[in-house]
Amino acid sequence: IWVFLLLAAWFILIPASGTRYQANWESLDARPLPTWYDEAKFGIFVHWGVFSVPGFESEWFWWHWKGQNPPDQKCVQYMLDNYPPGFSYPDFAPQFHAQFFDPDDWADIFEASGAKYVVLTAKHHEGFTTWPSSYSWNWNSVDTGPHRDLVGDLAEAVRNRSLHYGLYNSLYEWFNPLYLADKKNNFTTQDFVLKKLLPELYDMVLSYKPELIWSDGDWEAPDTYWNSTEFLAWLYNDSPVKDVIVTNDRWGAGCYCKHGGYYNCADKYTPGELPKHKWEKCQSVDTQSWGYRRTMRLSELMDLPSIIQDLVQTVAMGGNYLLNVGPTPDGMIPPVFEERLRGIGAWLEVNGEAIYSSKPWRIQTENATVPVWYTSNSKYSSVYAVFMTKPTVYTFHLSEPVTAESTTVTLLGNPEPLRWAPLHPRGLILLLPELPQTPAQAWILKLDGVK
């Protein structure tokens, strides 16, 4: 391990003809984000692990049952009612069978959703790895449970469909003795980082070559404890994915919305104004959990119009949208989640040019005849006005676009130009056609030749 880390540090220091990033935030934060990420706009998040087996409350079940003080009584009672005395959380692992997991089926669903990247949990806070980590003996998906390399199997299927592949990795582990010892020492020691976390991270990158690392579980300790800047310098300078890798901002206490690649800031983050830095909103179809829940109810799930509205507003504000689903422990994506994903894809098939590779327009939203959100796309030299409320009249008023004689307006999915007239000093009024029925309840006007 020490030789590996010393070699990594040496590679960071050797000169090269290209840009070399130093192990400090000023240097690392100056790295341009690889272009594929901003162009992609929409990705799928997958939370899957041992926590899927109890499937109760959330992926934080182990902590709520055995970590927090006092414990969550609903979790305590769930165990008393359903499992024998002495049953421990690691006893769930052999029941994580994944016997129906078909990575090609999953990848087909993700492709049909219109997503351009997929992020799978390689290791959540429970410490269980969904790949055969040699640093997680008997607590990984090959040694126990599925006896499969879940990360590797899904990687092949996703990449065969030309989707980008990313991995979620929690820095901390709730009950790892090495981590708990470092924590007891007020993070003045780094046994967990040097003997477990970093060797495992290097191994994960070298083995699977992810194009995105979604870091999490960082908030209890500063980035200097995690050696985050040293790892990122290696990742950006010398790793096999140095030219394509994208990272988020969860690399230590105080890093949120400040350091790293793009910013997550907080789960389900929505900015109040157009951010100056690239960001991502992670959202879950199940509003109560990221992992699978046996008790989820339809009323607790986002419906398709809500998802499309969230996606549109995120993209209009310059963000990417990462939508989560939690598979069952036997490896199935619940049909209600599949329905939502395929519904998004059907809408994007008609309206995708307003989303993919788009940029925020000079105005992000306005209260027109109904509320409207704007995007723009230089590839088509177009501005798009997205509305998610069906107007009660056929005339539609937009106050922000500046028109010219050459301006044309169409409804995506209908090539016929719409009749319009200019307003002064700017804006236009147009005649809407009969709007097509769509389960997404969202329509887009394409405006060419406007400023």
Image (cartoon, helix red, strand yellow):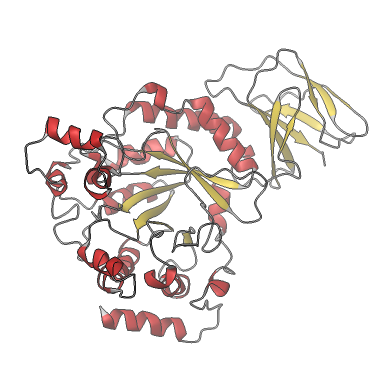
- Name the quadrant of the N terminus: bottom left
Q: Nearer the viewer, residue 322 or 405?
A: 322
Q: Is residue 2 above or below residue 356?
A: below
Q: Is residue 349 visible?
A: no
Q: Nearer the viewer, residue 65 or 258?
A: 65
Q: Quadrant of residue 108?
A: top left
Residue 403 image point, x, y percent: 86, 35
Residue 308 image point, x, y percent: 54, 31
Q: Is residue 401 shown left or right of residue 111?
A: right
Q: Is residue 258 shown left or right of residue 149?
A: right
Q: Is residue 322 visible?
A: yes
Residue at the location (35% across, 65% down)? 205
Q: Nearer the viewer, residue 164 or 397?
A: 397
How many marks the image carries: the answer is: 0
Residue reaching furthest left? 85
Q: Is residue 300 above or below residue 55?
A: above
Q: Quadrant of residue 238?
A: bottom left
Q: Quadrant of residue 328?
A: top left
Residue reaching furthest right? 424
Residue 379 image point, x, y percent: 68, 47
Residue at the location (81% across, 22% down)? 430
Q: Is residue 68 shown left or right of residue 371?
A: left
Residue at the location (48% across, 77% down)? 23
Q: Is residue 274 shown left or right of residue 9?
A: right
Residue 327 image point, x, y percent: 30, 37
Residue at the location (7% across, 44% down)? 86
